[in-house]
């Protein structure tokens, strides 16, 4: 794909993209009537595309989101766009509230880079709005329960699902895989991180017996859920998906650094933990997870995100991608470290395990 | 010796001017950037004010953790190198399980790590320590 020249604003690509969309949907013709880059995204770009289709499966005026790599962004150890598309297809087929992924293109792309197109999910994903507006997306205890139920539906996708062979199987369990992955990253860094090493060792020694291996979103938290007046309209940003443990995403959802200033509402700053768990338990048919079990997965979430924040700061510090926000992220790592230490002390006091 | 203002005084006042005189005139989409710059300056000002004391405390704590005999603490680049080396040793030992036992050494380790996190926050985000009731 090195022969492709990225079109940074997609403006020159409009005719080629329209022709591609017409062909993909079996339309006689297609016209792009609006094309607007959506806010956010450090590694990816999302474009709101409005298309008039002449016939075909999508006849009429429709809204989509085109997701592609941001030009110049250094690839990270995350899924490629075609892989993310495949994961979203599998989640959609399992009945998860994910914007329907429609078409994916990797080579000979009309925009010069890999992309896929999904249906447009209306509303907002703003975590700050969700935390401040108690009725945005409906009453929040019910909204959190819905998010728990969606996780349970997603977890019906198992390693025997077609088309997901690129996701590595955690041969020795989800914890061992995560610990090994994070240690491998730390080993690439010249500076030592004793608190993270302590956390990883603690997680290794205190690991629960491996559960079933299920599809995990990997970034399952407020900020990646689109909501409008009708409730949840779509779960976004699947590039960190992996096989893992059923409780992994639930623990991550409740981690303190994803509460956006509303620390007393453990489920993403919008509801109680039990609201989220209840929705998951009802949909999965599993018992409510225990406080001790969830504490373990919150510790893992904090150690994992502490490591990812070091990685984000490194994008800036390497000089390859100067960015003040990523630069300052290096000084946020300690908040996750402190929370992990606090939760480990709590687990040891309560005699978890 | 350098004339005044000290690095801390320079950063603190420059930050105040940025917030008082530049920020109010900025359109909303630029404010976030200036607030991030002000945050970076505040961190650097606190680091300048603390000097080498936190690193010296950390090295003394690491040496105590390993039962090393008391010796004079280095300064300047040697201090940074000594703390880095000590932390690298600790990181390797932690991974190998050398601190797994829930004994006095394990408790001392936990106290050391908690204090090192608190010290990082004293420089990077003292507000967070207050929120966590650790300050």
Image (cartoon, rainbow, N blue to C red):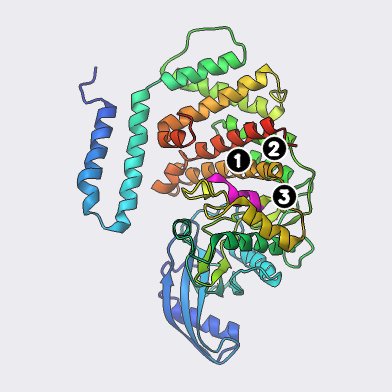
Observer-nearest residue: A185 or A308? A308
- Residue range (magenta): A249-256
Q: Is residue A191 above or below residue A152?
A: above
The N terminus of chain B is located in which quarter?
top left
Counting from the top left corner in percent of width and height, residue A49 is at 47, 76
Helix, strand or loop status at disc 2: helix
User: Is A117 placed left or right of A35 in the picture?
Assistant: right
Q: Residues within 10 Å of mark 3 (few under 14, many from 20)?
A: some
Cα gap from disc 2 to disc 1, whole angstroms = 9 Å
Front-lying residue, A26 or A287: A287
Task: Say which residue appears at 41% left-offset and 36% top-offset.
Answer: B127
Point out the frontmost of discs 2 and 3. 3
Would residue A13 be found to the left or right of residue B102 on screen?
Answer: left
Residue A289, which numbered label?
Answer: 3
State the CA–CA distance, disc 2 to disc 3: 18 Å
Residue B106 appears left or right of B45:
right
Closer to the camera in the image, A262 or A204: A262
Q: Residue at x 56, y 21 (%)?
A: B86
Which of the two discs, 3 and 1, sits closer to the camera? 3
Q: Is residue A175 above or below residue B112?
A: below
Main SS of the magenta part reads helix
Q: Position of residue B100 (x, y in %)?
A: 71, 25
Q: Position of residue A226 (x, y in %)?
A: 52, 66
Residue located beneath label 2 in the image: A203
According to the picture, the residue beneath numbered tag 1 turns out to be A303
Query: Does the rendering let one see residue A108?
Result: yes
């Amino acid at each position: 794909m090195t022969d492709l020249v990225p079109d940074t604003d997609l403006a020159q690509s409009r005719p080629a993209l329209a022709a591609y969309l017409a062909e993909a949907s079996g339309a006689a013709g297609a016209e792009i009537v609006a094309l607007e880059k959506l806010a956010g995204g450090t590694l990816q770009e999302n474009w709101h595309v409005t298309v008039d289709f002449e016939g075909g499966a999508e006849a009429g005026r429709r809204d989509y989101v085109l997701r592609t790599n941001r030009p110049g962004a250094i690839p990270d150890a995350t899924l490629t766009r075609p892989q993310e598309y495949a994961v979203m297809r599998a989640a959609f087929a399992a009945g998860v509230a994910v914007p329907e992924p429609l078409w994916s293109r990797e080579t000979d792309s009309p925009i010069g880079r890999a992309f896929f197109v999904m249906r447009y999910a209306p509303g907002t994903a703003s975590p700050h709005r969700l935390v401040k507006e108690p009725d945005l997306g409906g009453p929040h205890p019910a909204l959190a329960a819905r998010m728990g139920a969606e996780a349970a539906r997603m977890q019906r996708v198992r390693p025997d699902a077609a088309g997901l062979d690129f996701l590595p199987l955690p041969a020795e369990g989800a914890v061992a895989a995560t610990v090994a992955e994070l240690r491998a990253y730390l080993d690439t860094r010249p500076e030592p991180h004793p608190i993270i090493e302590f956390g990883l060792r603690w997680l290794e020694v205190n690991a629960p017996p491996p559960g079933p291996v299920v599809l995990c979103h990997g970034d399952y938290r407020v900020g990646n859920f689109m909501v409008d007046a009708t409730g949840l309209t779509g779960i976004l940003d699947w590039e960190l998906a992996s096989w893992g443990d059923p409780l992994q995403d639930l623990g991550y959802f409740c981690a303190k650094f994803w509460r956006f200033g509303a620390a007393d509402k453990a489920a993403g700053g919008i509801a109680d933990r039990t609201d989220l768990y209840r929705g998951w338990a009802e949909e999965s048919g599993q018992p409510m997870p225990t406080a001790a079990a969830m504490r373990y997965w919150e510790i893992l979430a904090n150690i994992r995100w502490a490591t990812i924040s070091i990685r984000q700061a490194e994008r800036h510090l390497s000089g390859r991608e100067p960015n003040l926000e990523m630069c300052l992220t290096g000084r946020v790592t300690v908040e996750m470290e402190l929370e992990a230490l606090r939760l480990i002390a709590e687990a040891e006091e309560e005699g978890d395990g | 010796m350098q004339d005044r203002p000290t690095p801390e005084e320079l950063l603190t006042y420059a930050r105040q001017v940025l917030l008082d005189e530049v920020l109010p005139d900025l359109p909303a989409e630029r404010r976030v950037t200036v607030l991030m710059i002000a945050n970076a300056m505040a961190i650097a000002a606190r680091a300048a004010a603390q000097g080498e004391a936190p690193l010296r405390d950390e090295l003394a704590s690491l040496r105590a953790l390993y039962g090393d005999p008391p010796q004079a603490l280095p300064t300047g680049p040697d201090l940074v190198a000594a703390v880095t080396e000590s932390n690298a040793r600790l990181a390797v030992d932690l991974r190998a399980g050398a601190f797994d036992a829930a004994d006095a050494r394990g408790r001392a380790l936990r106290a050391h790590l908690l204090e090192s996190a608190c010290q990082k926050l004293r420089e990077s985000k003292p507000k967070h320590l207050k929120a966590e009731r650790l300050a």
